[in-house]
Image (cartoon, rainbow, N blue to C red):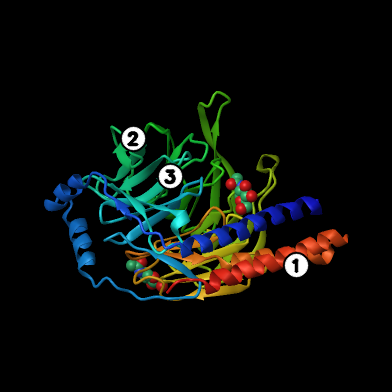
Amino acid sequence: MEIAALVAVTLLLGALVGLVALAVGRRKEEKREEIEQTVESSVESSAAKGPTSKKPKQEKQRSRKDKPAQHSFSDPLLASSLKGHSGNVTCLDFSSNGKYLASCADDRTVRIWSTKDFLEREHKCLRANVELDHATLVRFSPDSRAFITWLANGDTIRILKMIKKDDGTFSFKAAPEDFPQKHKAPIINIGIAETGKFIMSASTDTTIHIWDLKGELLASINTNQMTSSYAAVSPCGRFVASCGFTPDVKVWEVCFGKGGEFREVARAFDLKGHSAGVHAFAFSNNSHRMVTVSKDGTWKLWNTDVEYKKQQDPYLLKTVPCSSSEGSRVALSPDGRVVAISNGCNIAMYDAATGNLEKELHGVHSENISDLRFDINSRFLVCSGDKAIRVFHNAPGYQAAIKDMQDMLKKAQNEAMKQRLQQQIKDAQSALDTVLTARIE
Ligand SMILES: *[C@@H]1O[C@H](CO)[C@@H](O)[C@H](O)[C@H]1NC(C)=O
Ligand SMILES: *[C@@H]1O[C@H](CO)[C@@H](O)[C@H](O)[C@H]1NC(C)=O
């Protein structure tokens, strides 16, 4: 058991050290390439001319653009700022293969960034125009070759496919039809299951719709939480969860038969323990842990690796005081080691195991933080708020990984293993030091 865990951590850190070395090496090469490919740009310019049906949204968009663009922010953990959007970024999503980060903004574009460029000077991105509308939410499909968007004016879901052309460049093509309009209140989130079996959309009026990939409605849920503040599909693709005015987080399983046919949405388990409404929650990548942030002034970490069908309930691992407000977001690093919480324009990073506050970032964006996510390798934390996307080194995650190895070192029985661990701790520490000192102003 201990050995298995050790091997896992060893592998993970080996990969981490390798990646850091690679990234630092590559950055020195100073290669500059054409940084952006414009796709279907004619549509964008013609669409930008005439205001369409919904006036208020259009005006809001314009007045934001008129604001002075520069908001200065610096921090030793800031790895880079991804610039390109000319409107405020509202949503971020990493593809499950880890290669891309998608962002959308009210500038009518979705941009696809390459994660391997995060530490470079230039950040290449692909641009997909959202015709006659703009996307407020974006989520990658499981195969990373398509994404779903929520249309601000269309009030529905549009699927866009990435098509690799013969010359190696990409273009984007919308599915022939958008989903039917079904929500009667503002949308809070959309998601697509990693299994590729369903799409979820949720609105503030406690409605969650479950769709198949063609836009057929499979089921609708009323969460009975008075109002909804957040909902999401778990990274494993089995669950849909929701929170809002009531102090609980409700989790459902979306069930399919052996032949892949939809069966039902069944209540799985609840997270009960907060004493006020819940702003948001997040899953670890295997859905064995969840973290919640509440109006009661705390975040809570839960063990959700339970057999709920045998009446086992998830249990509370930790309660930690924190600042939060309406619109706060929470992210849990995929390895479960770090919790990040946004509050207005600020972010706090906590060690999930100890609950210690490891890092505070103030005034990260000029406007409230709209999204907050870790990359799939737990190396970076990214967030949006204004036009720029901030990418931070997950130093608290590296430190927690080092601490885990130090604990193993104390328990290690044989000399060979001890030496190995000592070397790995040294390597990880120097990789971390390199990350923190090698950054470019
Ligand atoms: C979750 O993350 C861990 C550590 O980063 C990784 O080893 C594992 O493969 C991931 N699992 C899934 C289901 O993505
Ligand atoms: C921004 O965050 C603050 C809390 O820090 C909150 O009071 C305010 O309502 C938020 N503004 C918007 C527009 O959501």
Position above or below: 19 against 422: above
- 77 horizontally vs 173: left or right: right
Residue type, label 2: Asp
Q: Position of residue 403 (x, y in %)?
A: 70, 67
Q: Quadrant of residue 162?
A: top left
Q: Position of residue 72 (x, y in %)?
A: 35, 76
* Disc number placed over residue 166 in the picture, else none: 2
Distance (Cα) linking label 3 and label 1: 37 Å
Which residue is found at the position 51% from the left and 40% from the top?
194
Q: Position of residue 217 (x, y in %)?
A: 39, 33
Asked if residue 138 can be seen in this view, the reply is yes
Which residue is found at the position 56% from the left and 43% from the top?
236
Which residue is found at the position 57% from the left and 61% from the top?
20
Q: Tell me the crowding category of disc 1: few under 14, some 14 to 19, or many 20 or more residues within 10 angstroms, Cα based.
A: some
Residue type, label 3: Phe
Q: Secondary structure at mark 2?
A: loop
